[in-house]
Image (tube, rainbow, N blue to C red):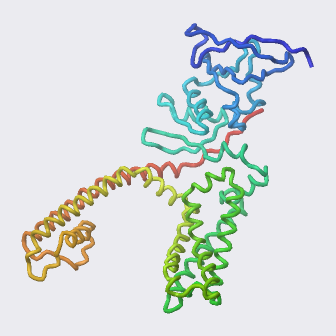
C-alpha cells in the first residue's frame, strides 16, 4: 500500500456547465489512496456531455445492477485528472435517470425526448422499468420490489428463489405448476361451497364427519401453507400485510378456523345453538376465496387499478345518481300518493322506484298510474341514460389506455458490458 495523500476536489453545483462559472465551486478535502483508481467519496460528480450532476454514493447503490450503481461498471468512466465521471450521453434524459435513483424506482420520460431515444438511454444505464401510461403522458414505474430485493432478502438466494417461485408464475415451469394447482384448489373450494348449500346439507360448526368438511379442510390447508410461505419469504413483511389481496387470503381461511374452534366448544357443551348462530354468518366470508383468482389475472388487477384511479369520476357518478333518486322520487310521490291503492306510500317508497327506473331494470312492482306520472317516468329514464353515461366514458377511456399499455411487450433487462 502506498502512503495516504490529501486531494483537493472541486465539484460544481448541480446542473452547471463546464464552460461558464455559474456559481461557486464546492471544495472539500478527502483522504484517498494514491494507488486507487476510484476515490471512496460520500458524494460523486457525474459529467454528462459537459453538464455536471452531484449526488450521493448511497443513492446510486440502491440499484447495484445498473451502470451507475455498480462500482465496477462505472469505474472505467472515471477521469482522475478532473476527479469526476464523464458520460457522453443525452443531458435531458439524465435528469430522469438521476431521479430514478433518488425516488427509489420512479421514472418519467422528459417531454422534450422521444420515447425511442429515452429507451436507448435506459438500455445504456442498465435500467429496465415497466411502462405505464398516466394522465400527463408516460410514467414509467419500476417493479416496486426491484430495488428492495438485493438488500432485504434475509436468507439470501434461497429466500429470493422462493419469493420468485411463489409470486411470479411466469418465472419457471415449477412456478406455473404451483399457480395452476392454486387455481384448481380455489375452484374445488368454490364448488364444494355450492354443493354443500343444496337441501339440508349445511353442516354445523361441530360437524366434522361430512365429506364437505374434508374437502374444505384440504383446501384451507393448501391456502394456509401458501400464505404462510409468501409471508415468510416476503422481502418487506409490513408491506406484505398492507396489500389488500393478502387480506382477502386471510378472510378466505378465517371462517374455517373459527368454525373449527366453535365446534370444539360445542362438543364440550359450553355453548348452545342459539348462541353460536351469529357465528354462522362468518361463512359468508368463504366466498372471498373467489377473489384469490384476481392474483392470477393481470387484466383483473388492471381493472381494479383503473377503478382506483377513477375514484373522482365514480364519486361524481354516485352524487348524480343520488340526486336523481331523491328529486324524481319526491316528484313522483306528490303526483301518485293520492291515487287509490297506490304503491307510492312515502318518499322512501318512491325513491326505490327511482332506483329501479334509473337503472332501467323495471321490476314492475311499482309503476305510475297517472298521465303526468308516466311523463315524469319518461323524463327520468332519458336523463338517467344521458347523465349516468357521461362518467362511464371517462372510465372506459382510462381503461383502454391502460389496457393498450399492458399489451405492449415487456422490455428485457439490458445486458451491461463490464
State the count of labels.
0
Residue lying at the far right in this picture: please name it. 1
> Measuring 70% from the left and 46% from the top, which residue is drawn there?
149
Quarter of the rendering occupied by the N terminus: top right
Residue at the far front in the pictured view = 270
Q: Nearer the viewer, residue 125 or 3?
A: 3
Q: What residue is at 52 percent from the left and 75 percent from the top? A: 282
Seen in the picture, residue 171 relative to 353 is either above or below; the reply is above
State the quadrant of the C terminus: top right
* Residue 163 placement (x, y as % from top left): 70, 56
Q: Residue at x 78, y 52 (%)?
A: 155
Q: Is residue 26 left or right of residue 360?
A: right
Q: Is residue 18 above or below residue 187?
A: above
Front-most of residues 223 and 379: 223
Work out whether residue 242 or residue 183 is closer to the camera in this orientation and state it.
Answer: 242
Residue drawn at (74%, 22%) of the image? 41
- Name the spot of residue 310 as percent of width and height, x first: 40, 51
- Tell me if 303 is positioned left or right of 245 in this view: left
Residue 277 position within the rendered picture, expressed as x and y whole percent measured from the top left:
50, 83
Where is 392 relative to 26, above or below? below
The x and y percentages for residue 156 are: 79, 49
Q: Quadrant of residue 102?
A: top right
| Residue 13, picture quadrant | top right
Relative depth, front residue between 310 and 279: 279
Residue 249, compared with residue 313, is above or below; it is below
Amino acid at each position: 500500500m502506498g502512503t495516504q495523500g490529501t486531494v483537493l476536489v472541486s465539484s460544481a453545483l448541480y446542473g452547471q456547465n463546464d464552460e461558464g462559472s455559474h456559481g461557486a465551486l464546492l471544495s472539500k478535502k478527502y483522504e484517498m489512496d494514491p494507488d486507487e483508481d476510484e476515490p471512496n467519496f460520500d458524494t460523486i460528480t457525474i459529467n454528462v456531455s459537459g453538464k455536471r450532476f452531484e449526488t450521493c454514493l448511497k443513492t446510486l447503490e440502491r440499484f447495484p445492477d445498473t451502470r451507475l450503481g455498480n462500482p465496477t461498471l462505472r469505474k472505467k468512466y472515471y477521469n482522475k485528472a478532473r476527479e469526476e465521471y464523464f458520460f457522453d450521453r443525452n443531458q435531458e434524459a439524465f435528469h430522469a435517470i438521476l431521479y430514478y435513483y433518488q425516488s427509489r424506482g420512479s421514472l418519467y420520460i422528459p417531454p422534450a425526448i422521444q420515447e425511442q431515444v429515452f429507451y436507448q438511454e435506459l438500455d445504456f444505464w442498465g435500467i429496465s422499468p415497466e411502462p405505464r401510461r398516466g394522465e400527463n403522458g408516460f410514467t414509467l414505474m419500476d417493479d416496486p420490489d426491484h430495488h428492495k430485493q438485493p438488500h432485504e432478502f434475509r436468507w439470501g438466494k434461497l429466500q429470493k428463489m422462493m419469493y420468485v417461485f411463489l409470486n411470479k408464475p411466469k418465472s419457471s415451469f415449477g412456478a406455473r405448476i404451483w399457480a395452476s394447482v392454486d387455481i384448481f384448489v380455489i375452484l374445488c373450494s368454490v364448488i364444494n361451497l355450492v354443493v354443500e348449500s343444496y337441501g339440508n346439507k349445511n353442516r354445523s360448526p361441530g360437524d366434522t364427519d361430512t365429506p364437505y368438511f374434508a374437502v374444505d379442510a384440504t383446501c384451507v390447508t393448501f391456502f394456509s401453507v401458501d400464505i404462510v410461505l409468501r409471508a415468510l419469504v416476503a422481502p418487506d413483511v409490513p408491506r406484505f400485510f398492507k396489500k389488500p389481496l393478502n387480506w382477502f387470503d386471510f378472510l378466505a381461511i378465517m371462517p374455517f378456523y373459527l368454525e373449527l374452534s366453535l365446534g370444539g366448544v360445542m362438543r364440550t357443551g359450553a355453548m348452545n345453538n342459539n348462541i353460536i348462530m351469529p357465528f354462522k354468518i362468518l361463512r359468508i366470508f368463504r366466498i372471498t376465496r373467489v377473489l384469490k383468482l384476481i392474483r392470477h389475472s393481470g387484466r383483473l388487477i388492471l381493472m381494479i387499478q383503473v377503478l382506483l384511479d377513477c375514484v373522482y369520476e365514480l364519486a361524481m357518478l354516485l352524487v348524480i345518481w343520488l340526486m336523481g333518486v331523491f328529486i324524481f322520487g319526491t316528484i313522483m310521490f306528490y303526483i301518485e300518493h293520492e291515487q287509490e291503492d297506490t304503491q307510492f306510500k312515502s318518499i322512501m317508497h318512491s325513491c326505490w322506484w327511482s332506483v329501479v327506473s334509473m337503472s332501467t331494470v323495471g321490476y314492475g312492482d311499482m309503476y305510475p298510474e297517472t298521465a303526468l306520472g308516466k311523463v315524469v317516468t319518461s323524463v327520468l329514464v332519458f336523463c338517467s341514460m344521458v347523465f349516468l353515461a357521461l362518467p362511464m366514458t371517462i372510465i372506459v377511456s382510462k381503461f383502454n389506455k391502460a389496457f393498450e399499455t399492458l399489451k405492449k411487450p415487456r422490455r428485457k433487462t439490458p445486458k451491461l458490458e463490464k
